[in-house]
Amino acid sequence: MNKRDVLLNELAQGLRPISEGIEWFDGRGQEEQFQVLLFLRHHCVQARAITEDAPESIRRSGLRPTHTPAVLISRGRIDEQLGKIAGLAPLDERRKAFRLLIAVLAIADGRRRERFCSGGCSPLVAPTVRRLTAQHRTLKATSQSNVFQVADQSHQKSQWRAPVIRSAYAASV
């Protein structure tokens, strides 16, 4: 993790005041601000932000519900809306987007930490959880494909038996 990542995580965890984050954000050039917003969007999605996070995110960010980022996050699929928010061009909209994305990350990451790190969390826990989740998905997919193979085999057996039954029936008639 670089300094930017640490700063953004500290802002989301409430370890630094948002005013410090806004000052830092305003000190970046337009392209770097865009990259920061994309980074935040990515981490919001990774932390599994959900549509129900929108009202609390708007409240925490201090935005009015009529501000463009607040309107966007309240409509449609959140992962798509976060992308639109990260892509806002005017400077004042980017500031609002920054505040809102920090709030979304704070809520989603807080829920993730509560769920996966109830006994304490270290930077190594998240990769372990991701690895275990990936292993679970692989096992689940493997077991599903085995079920389909068994179903195909039994289907093939039933097709094999069908002609025998018909011929036995035909011989008895």
Image (tube, grey):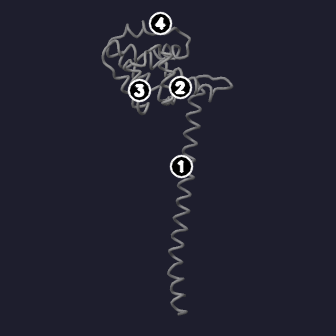
Q: Earlier in the sequence, mark 2 or mark 1?
A: 2
Which residue, given by chain and number where applicable, does mark 2 sit on?
108
Residues at marks 3 and 2 touching, judged by CB atoms closer than 8 Å: no
Q: Which mark is residue 18?
A: none
Please state the horizontal and vertical placement of residue 171, each as a whole percent of the image.
52, 92
Q: Earlier in the sequence, mark 1 or mark 4?
A: 4
Choose mark 2 or mark 1, whichever is in front: 2
Q: Of the residues shown, which amino acid type is indicated by label 2?
A: Ala
Please state the horizontal and vertical placement of residue 137, each as a whole percent of the image.
55, 43
In the displayed structure, 76 sits above or below 156; it is: above
Q: Of the residues shown, which amino acid type is indicated by label 4?
A: Glu
Q: Cα distance, mark 2 to mark 1?
A: 27 Å
Q: Cα distance, mark 3 to mark 1?
A: 30 Å
Q: Earlier in the sequence, mark 4 or mark 2?
A: 4
Q: Earlier in the sequence, mark 3 or mark 4?
A: 4
Which residue, given by chain and number where applicable, does mark 4 sit on?
20
**Residues packed near mark 2 inside 10 Å, few (<14), some (14 to 19) or many (20 plus):** many
